[in-house]
Image (cartoon, rainbow, N blue to C red):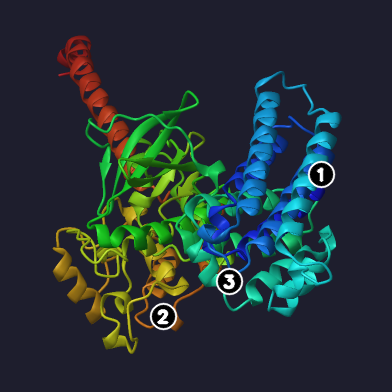
Amino acid sequence: MSKIIVSLFNFCIAILNMNAAELALGNEVYRIVSTILALVRDTMIDDEHAMQLSECCFNACETMKGALQGKNPSDLTESEKATMENLERLIHRVECTLRSAASSSPCTKYNQKNVESYMQSIREILSTLQASRFPPGEDHSVGERITTAGHRRLFRSRVTVKELPSLIDAIFSGNKVGETMCCLPVGHAQTFIDVVDEALHAPDLLSGIQNKCLKLLYRTCGHNALLPSTLEVPVCFDRTSNALYRGGYADVWKGKFCAQDVAVKVIRTYSNDDSLKIMKRFCKEVFMWRFLQHPNILPLIGTSMSENRFAMVSEWMPNGNINQFTKSHPEVNRPTLLAGVAKGLIYLHGNGIVHGDLKGANILIDETGQARLADFGLITIVSDSANATSSNSHAHGGTTRWMSPELIDPEYFGFEKSRATKSSDCYALGMVIYETISGNVPFQGYRNHTVSIKVVRGERPRREANFEESLWKMLESCWASKPNDRPSVEDVLRSLEKVSYSREPLAREGLLFRQAIVTFAWQRMFLLFMLILTPIVVYYLTPYMTVYL
């Protein structure tokens, strides 16, 4: 796989250095490389054959660039137009043959004779094209026309697997790279993203190369508001029905994907002006979510477009969120659940991601009873929409009752703007612990505006009877007004694990309720027993008492 990846990388570098007119004449080349990539992924052709074909496509790009340097399509001579048409027809034949191979048996391999035949034809046409453009005796190597030194080195020779890191570095070192990525036509940018994404998943590439590919792909997706094609999933759900959940910025439906229940979260957009900005953020955040793998993180299945609205498809969590789960399962060990929440948050922070909207409603429970964090990163997407409003949400995008004081009023605490941090996540984690154990939302009974005032003034939820001393002290440290005074999430995890290991019944609502029922039942049984026993005792003891008297 590494050979085909290297070849496709060389091809993409050539594409990034084409102008708009040259790209317009290169559509056929793009289609053939996309086809090669898909067939390699599906094992319809082997790596060696695919590499040879893609090398020919790379040569076609180089030759077209040389022939079309500084020209508009209307400026081509009749000879150049005829040669170009022959090249496009030939590549179209290659594409049709490849697609025919793809539609046949999975065991079918692309015929080596066909590969050699097409390669020879392409070489002949490219020679004709190059000869018609350049006078004899001149040096017209493509590499010499690239201004960046790094790019010149890349185009003088093909790149090997070991040279991929320097190749990617050269992409970023160019002054016009960002502009070029932004100006790529959608179809071309999508092909480039898919090629780099394929490289990212190649098992025989070094980890250092994969990290560089990740950075390249993240940047390209953000520039072009696109995602790898492999993320698009055909999900079915009924938009005409009522959403199962309506949040401040998204609606959730239950759908089907491959006969599996999935959650489809559709993000709301509030104006056409916001759509592109939100889509760019959406692509970046979803792209990062794709690579997060942890037992306490909600897995991403893919993305979908529904009526021009962006949707994220994830696994369906049958037990709902943590609040619903603890109400229906009062006997559950809540510190163990909360320890899972802390572990998921530590994992996010370790990957440079701040949740930003941690609360009970965003913590889902899977079929095994494991806590899964959801909606991380979504906060940075929706906060770009200036017209977004929610009765429960703050301008920062978080939810007021779980927000730290510096997010509610940043100026008061010496900050220029409201920005979620690891420290604000720790504050929210403390509120989640309070919410999960007490069974009440923070500041229950107060309006959001009143809550904001109370939090900035330093007021916090009151301690309830079912909190032991050590746990409550830990929560108070999480709620410190100054971010630097709060503990790390690792410290919170250690405190939760100590509570869990001591087997203290912190989920006392269910336990106390059961104890009350048992006590009440025993009392009723004792009373009934006494009512039955008393007449019997009196009946049998009366004669003896009479004699005695």
Residue 483 place in picture, x, y as percent: 41, 80
- Badge nearest the viewer, 3 or 1: 1
Query: Circle 2 is placed at which residue position?
Result: 483
Viewer-side residue, 353 vs 48: 48
Viewer-side residue, 189 vs 401: 189
Q: CA distance from mark 2 to mark 1?
A: 58 Å
Viewer-side residue, 510 vs 269: 269
Secondary structure beneath disc 3? helix
Residue drawn at point x = 31 percent, y = 54 percent: 438
Hey, which residue is sitting farthest front in the picture?
Answer: 78
So how many labels did they put on this image?
A: 3
In the rendered view, would you say 454 is above or below 393? below
Amino acid carrying label 3: it is Val
Residue drawn at point x = 20 percent, y = 15 percent: 532
Q: Is residue 147 left or right of residue 120?
A: left
Query: Circle 3 is placed at which residue position?
Result: 177
Amino acid carrying label 1: it is Gln
Residue drawn at point x = 39 percent, y = 72 percent: 420
Q: Is residue 194 left or right of residue 507?
A: right
Viewer-side residue, 75 vs 70: 75
Secondary structure beneath disc 1? helix
In the rendered view, would you say 503 is above or below 89? below
Amino acid carrying label 2: it is Pro
Do the residues bearing badges 2 and 1 touch, measured as CB atoms within 8 Å?
no
Residue 212 place in picture, x, y as percent: 68, 65
- Badge nearest the viewer, 2 or 3: 3
